[in-house]
Amino acid sequence: MSYRPVITNMEEASSNEKSGLYEFILYLADGTVCRASYSRSPEWKMTNINRLQKTPCPVCRKDFICKCIESYKGELEQQINENQWIGKALAK
């Protein structure tokens, strides 16, 4: 069974509007929490994503730093765009 991340919520963690840099917290359906960095110039683009150390990695089951979630960057970014999560997070 392969891992399929599903975003259930997203909120803004920090921002620097002058430079167009934003950080968002992503909550996934399996309880995983991630931090995604975005650049707004010229369009919204995910620059980095990492798993916060609250639960073991859903892919490798390690409870320390790993880079497994980076391989799902494209899939997560697609969900964010399709469901307009950035607009919802900034509206709060």
Image (cartoon, rainbow, N blue to C red):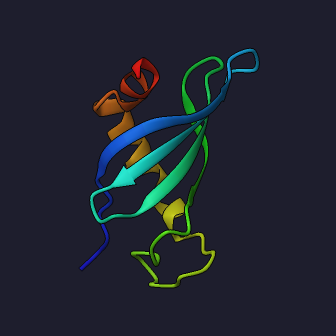
Q: Position of residue 88 (x, y in %)?
A: 36, 25
Q: Give the quarter of the figure containing the C terminus.
A: top left
Q: Position of residue 13 (x, y in %)?
A: 57, 38
Relative horizontal placement of residue 9, taking residue 17 as reference (left or right): left
- Residue drawn at x 28%, y 32% is 83
Number of numbered discs visible in the structure rendering = 0
- Residue drawn at x 54%, y 26% is 44
Extreme-right residue of the structure: 19
Extreme-left residue of the structure: 1
Relative horizontal placement of residue 54, taking residue 82 as reference (left or right): right
- Residue drawn at x 46%, y 75% is 57
Q: Give the quarter of the figure containing the N terminus.
A: bottom left
Q: Position of residue 45 (x, y in %)?
A: 56, 32
Question: Up-down: is 14 above or below 63?
Answer: above
Q: Position of residue 59 (x, y in %)?
A: 41, 77
Rendered image quadrant of residue 58? bottom left
Rendered image quadrant of residue 52? bottom right
- Residue drawn at x 75%, y 15% is 18
Relative horizontal placement of residue 20, taking residue 71 as reference (left or right): right
Relative horizontal placement of residue 47, taking residue 85 as reference (left or right): right
Question: Up-down: is 18 above or below 37?
Answer: above
Rendered image quadrant of residue 91? top left
Question: Up-down: is 62 above or below 53?
Answer: below
